[in-house]
Amino acid sequence: MSRWLRRWTKLYHYHHPVMGIAGLFATVILARPGEHTFGVGPLEVDAFYASLIAFGALFVVGVIDTYDPEDYGLDTSDTED
């Protein structure tokens, strides 16, 4: 398979941890705890902590996931560059 397809699938696979880290940094730098809250029924949720949990979970899931070329229909015999 061509090199561009392998690079594309790796980029697609590894964008989740990058988005998680970027979201964590943006949340910590741009937001403060207690500034924005939203209510869901009787539950009051702080947007700062909700975004920390969401981006943290995205980062953890992206890191523990493994890249398998066969998931993308690539042969393992293709060279990686």
Image (cartoon, grey):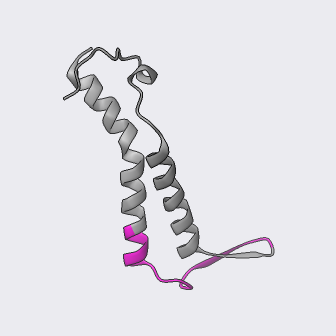
| x, y percent for residue 24 | 42, 66
Name the residue: 42% across, 75% down. Answer: 28
> Looking at the image, which residue sits at the far left?
81
Name the residue: 44% across, 36% down. Answer: 66
Give the image quarter of residue 5: top left
| x, y percent for residue 22 | 36, 61
| x, y percent for residue 35 | 53, 85
Q: Is residue 50 above or below residue 58?
A: below
Q: Is residue 73 above or below residue 80?
A: above
Rendered-image quadrant of the N terminus = top left
Q: Is residue 45 magenta?
A: no
Q: Is residue 15 above or below residue 6?
A: below
| x, y percent for residue 19 | 39, 54
The reply, left or right, for residue 48 in relation to residue 41 is left
> Looking at the image, which residue sits at the far right?
42
Give the image quarter of residue 45: bottom right
The reply, left or right, for residue 77 in relation to residue 68 is left
Q: Is residue 32 magenta?
A: yes
Name the residue: 44% across, 78% down. Answer: 31
Rendered-image quadrant of the C terminus = top left
Extent of the magenta region: 25-41
**Depth order, front residue of 17/45:** 17
The reply, left or right, for residue 65 in relation to residue 53 is left
